[in-house]
Amino acid sequence: MRFVPWRCLPVTMINFLLPMASNSKKIQVIQTVDTGDFSTFIPVNATQTCMADVHAIPFNEQVRGVNLGGWLVLEPWITPSMFYQFLNKGEGETGFDMYTFCEVLGPEEGNKQLRRHWDAWVTKDIIEELAGMNVNSLRLPVGDWMYKPYGPYPGCTDGSLEYVDLLLDWAAEYNLTVLLDIHGMKDSQNGFDNSGQSLGFEWTSSVTVYPAGLTTFQHWPIRAAEWMGKFDRKTTSYPQINYDNIEHSLDVIRGMVDMYKDHPAVFGLQPVNEPWELTPIEHLKDFYWEGYLIVKRSAPEWKYVMHDSFRFDPNVWGGFMAGCPDRVLDTHIYQAWNRPASRASYYNNACSWKQRIVEMENQFGPVIVGEWSLATDNCAMWLNGFNDNLPGFPMLPCKYIPCADPYMGTVQPGTPVDKNQPLQGPYGSGV
C-alpha cells in the first residue's frame, strides 16, 4: 500500500485516534474581543481563548485515517524511484527534496516527471479500495508553494491543485473526509525533507581528501529550520522573527479556505506539520490563533488541527484556546528512533501513551494521533534523508532486500537501479 506515514514503514496504515525571541513584535490583533464574523462563539484575542460557544460538536467517533504521503510533497524514502536519477551526481546536480528536485530539473522537466508521478501514485481505484477497508478519512499533505509559488516551484508544480480537486471529489464519492495538511512551509519549519527543503545543508567535497574524488555533504549536524526566522545555532534561538514568512503562511490559509470552504469532503485544516521543537512556542501559538480565526470566519464547521511541535506536554498546551470549538492537538508517535529494547518494552511504551493522551485531553481537549508506526528500527532506505542517516543510526543490523521495481515503470529517469552496483554517491555524513 502506498499510503504511508512520514518516516515509517511503507506498509503501515495511519490511525487518526480521536477519543471522546526576544523580538517584541507580534502578529497584530485588532481588538481584545473579536465579535465580528463569528456567529457561534466569541474569540478573545488577549487570552487566545473563546467564550459563548453554542455549536461545538464533541469528537465522539473514531477517525480511521490514512496519510497520502509522498504524493504532492515528495519524500525520498517514500518514493525513492523519483530520486534514483540523482545517484552519482555532483554538487548542484542532486535533488534531495521537493525544493532541490525542482531546482535541479527545472520547471519543464520537473513538471513532466511530477505529473507522471501524480497520475500513478494516487488513483480513484485506490481510494475506492481504502473506503472498502473501512478507512473513513484521508490526511492530504500539501506544500504552501502550491498556493503561493516561490523559488523553484513556479512551473515545476503547475497542475498540482488539479489533483487536490480530484482527490476531494473522489473522497466525497466514497464518503471519506479529507484533512488538508500544510506539510511544507517556506524556508522549512523543521529542516526535514518532509517540509519540502532540508535545512541546513552544505557540500563538503572540497575537504574530503580520502577517498579522493568523492562528492560529500552534511545535513544532520547542522540542521536548521528558518520558517520563523534565521536560526542561531550557538544560542539555539531565533533572534528575529520572520513576519513576512508568517504572513505568507496566513495568506496560504486564507487561499485554501476560500478555495475549499464549500467542498463537502473537507474535514478540516492543519496549518503546519511538525514545526520543530526549537520553534518559539509563543510565536507558534500566535500563528495557530490567527490561522484559527481565518478558518472559522469562512469555514465554521472545519476542524482545526495543530501539531504539538514535538512537545506533547500539558504544561505547554493546557488551557491554550480553551473554549474554542473544533480545535484539536495532533501528536505523532514513533518508536523507530528509540534505543533498541525488548519486545515487552515496545509494548509498554505504546500502552503508556494512553494515559498521556488522557491527561492531555483533560488539560487541553481532543487529541489525534495523526502519524504512528509499528516500526522499531531505522532500516528503511533514505528514511533519514537521501543517501544520508542520523549519526549512530541504524542502531541494529538491517536485512537488505533488492529495490522494488519503479511504480511508473522504466520511463522514469534513473530506473531501474543497477542492483549489482555498490553504494553510490553523493555521500551524506551519516552514510
Image (cartoon, grey):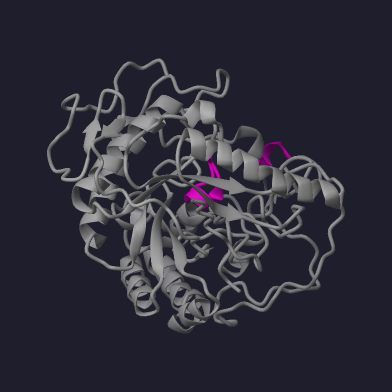
Residue 406 in picture, x, y percent from top left: 62, 77
Q: Is residue 203 visible?
A: no
**Residue 419 relative to residue 102: left or right:** right
> What is the x, y in percent for residue 57?
34, 52
Foreground of the two, 264 or 334: 264
The x, y position of residue 70, in whole percent, is: 52, 63
Residue 292, above or below 258 = above
Observer able to see residue 124: yes
Q: Residue at x 57, y 56 (%)?
A: 94
| Quarter of the figure with residue 8 | bottom right
Q: Is residue 199 magenta?
A: yes
Q: Magenta includes 364? A: no
Vertically, is 214 above or below 246? below
Q: Position of residue 65 (x, y in %)?
A: 51, 64
Residue in the picture at 18% in, 28% down:
33
* Residue range corresponding to the magenta coloring: 190-208
Q: Quadrant of residue 320?
A: top left
Of the pair 192 and 261, the residue shown nearer to us:
261
**Vertical relation: 39 (above or below) 416:** above
Instruction: Name the image quarter holding the N terminus.
Output: bottom right
Task: Report the residue at 50% width, 74% height from top.
Answer: 121
- Count the labels in the image: 0
Q: Residue furthest left?
A: 36
For the residue pair 243 and 180, the one nearer the viewer reads as 180
